[in-house]
Image (tube, helix red, strand yellow):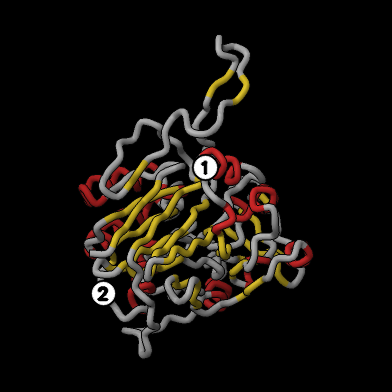
Amino acid sequence: MCTDSGVDPAAVAFAAPRVAEGAAVDPVVLEPVDALTITVLVDNSFDALLADTDVATRGRLGTGQPQGAHQYVEGATRAGLVAEHGFAALVTVTRDGHDHTLLFDTGVSPDGMSTNGRRLDLAPGDIQAVVLSHGHADHTGGFPGLERWLGRAPSPLVLHPAAFTRRRLAPPGGEPFVMPLLDRAALSGDGIELVERREPSFLLDGSVLVTGEVDRTTEFERGMAFHEAFLDEAWRPDPWIVDDQALVVDVRGRGLVVLTGCGHAGAVNIARHALRLTGGGHLHALLGGLHLTGPGFEQIIEPTVAALVGMAPDVVVPAHCTGWRAQMRLAQELGDAFLPGAVGSRYAFAAA
């Protein structure tokens, strides 16, 4: 998403997904749901004093079972929830009187997500599938705790095959940071059924759409310039992060709800792609990381905000890697449609 990328234009062009111009020739049929609930299990912040709204119910201080704390007269405290640099959300759709649940991402630490899930008194056995937005460690780190929480392997696991790519961040003037690499053999050995797809796919009886690779159509969402992949025995530019994908749900009579992990494909690209795949309609809500933080991305805040305002969504919850500058501008321009994100927030969308 940087204008001054400093990468080889030929390498970027080679790696870039092909753009599908215009409306979808054959839009997918996404079955509308009667209700959708998204419970955030991992996010960068926890605010126990946020007010509830018609859409959002917030996590509170005192959430969870008492923990030992000898400095208090009672010898215990309730600490609330854990915030960390990552994202995970529990997604439940209701259709024809039946609930179906999946997990979207797992956070960064082995136990952060499962700790919050326990403190929120959620039932992990309801999870029917896990979807990864992409392969970065702040979205894939929670598998050890997830297996202990579930008491079984989380399966099936839906992800893009490029999620198994070795990657690093190499910012100009800084030391490269090599990210932990997902191990396909280790996951399969744990009994997880891997579903690797580049194309759009459905989950939960056709009620949830996984976008697969997102079309890059805007002129300003140009990827992460200092992101590299280890390919052919060398570190090479990997600005597009092609495994980035989102979830899409059609809430009957309301429109599309789009859930992102980091939004590496670009918030506007993702929203437009979801609308194109489903044949148009209204963007009811956009939730998740929009990756607009840091000097390399803040320059595209204004065109991103302008494009999102033009879509007139009813709800926008910028979480995780969106950054405070972008959140401020979205709050200014979107008015009541803007909702701050926080760990433990439960967002409920009901059919009209």
Query: Between disc 2 and disc 1, whose residue precedes?
Result: 1
Q: Quadrant of residue 76?
A: top right
What distance separates the C-alpha of mark 2 from that of mark 1?
36 Å
Q: Which residue type does callout 2 highlight?
A: Gly
Residue, far bottom: 25
Q: Which residue is mark 1?
A: 121
Along the horizontal axis of the image, is 70 left or right of 253? right
Q: Residue 111: x percent and y percent?
A: 64, 43
Instruction: Determine the residue positioned at 38% across, 64% down.
Output: 258
- Horizontal relation, residue 236 to residue 13: left or right: right
The residue lying at 52 percent from left, 50 percent from top is 87
Residue 306 position (above or below residue 24)? above
Quarter of the rendering occupied by the N terminus: bottom left
Q: Where is 60 relative to 256, above or below? A: above
Q: Is residue 233 visible?
A: yes
Instruction: Give the residue at mark 2.
Output: 281
Front-lying residue, 206 or 228: 206
Q: Amino acid at mark 1?
A: Asp
